[in-house]
Amino acid sequence: MTITLEQAEKMIVAAKAKSVELDTKMNIAVVDAGANLVAFGRMDGAWLGSLDISIKKAKTARFFDMDTGIIGTLSQPGGALFGIEHSNEGLITFPGGVPVKDVEGNIIGAIGVSGSTVENDHAVAEAGATATATA
């Protein structure tokens, strides 16, 4: 199973709504089970530098099937994954990337969000990730 375009579009809409609620502007990327970009949205005025970060957050979350913030904790000096951000042509190891699961709990892709604080990025990604439950 993998994310469909319809699901990815629902995720972008849900993530954008959460971003508006938080009064921030985001770049939102959705990748499929193979970490291929399926959908992308850049809100008007979102930082251009966050475009690539959002895509890398989504890919990182899918490559390792965990929130990027968890990878960040494990990749600190002395941690089990120290230095991992230098693999796979660059990973992002701070919050804002979240694996996406289908209704049966299978990972079908990931969402990555960037453009604000890491707390806001994670909240917006979570909102997008949960939108697939009804897709």
Image: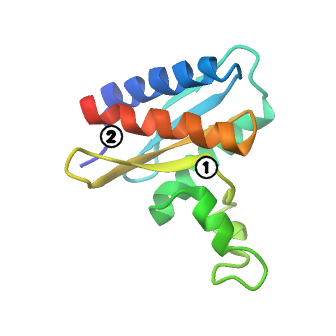
Q: Quadrant of residue 120?
A: top right
Tag 1: Cα neighbours inside 10 Å, few (<14), some, or many (≥20)?
A: many
Q: CA distance from mark 1 to mark 2?
A: 16 Å
What is the x, y in percent for residue 55? 60, 43
The residue located at (61%, 24%) in the rendering is: 19
What is the x, y in percent for residue 57? 61, 49
In the rendered image, the vertical position of residue 4 relative to residue 93, given as above or below:
above
Callout 2: SS: loop
Q: Quadrant of residue 125?
A: top right
In the rendered image, the vertical position of residue 126 relative to residue 47, given as above or below:
below
Q: Is residue 35 left or right of residue 46?
A: left
Callout 1: SS: helix
Q: Earlier in the sequence, mark 1 or mark 2?
A: 2
In the rendered image, the vertical position of residue 93 relative to residue 87, given as above or below:
above
View extreme (left): residue: 104
Tag 2: Cα neighbours inside 10 Å, few (<14), some, or many (≥20)?
A: many
Query: Label 1, on which residue?
Result: 57
The residue located at (63%, 49%) in the rendering is: 56
Marks 1 and 2 close (CB-CB < 8 Å):
no
Q: Is residue 128 visible?
A: yes
Closer to the camera in the image, 6 or 14:
14
Q: Which mark is residue 7?
A: none
Query: Label 2, on which residue?
Result: 3
As shown in the figure, which amino acid type bears the numbered disc 1? Answer: Lys
Q: Is residue 125 left or right of residue 1?
A: right
- Image quadrant in which the C terminus is located: top left
Q: How is the image coloured?
A: rainbow
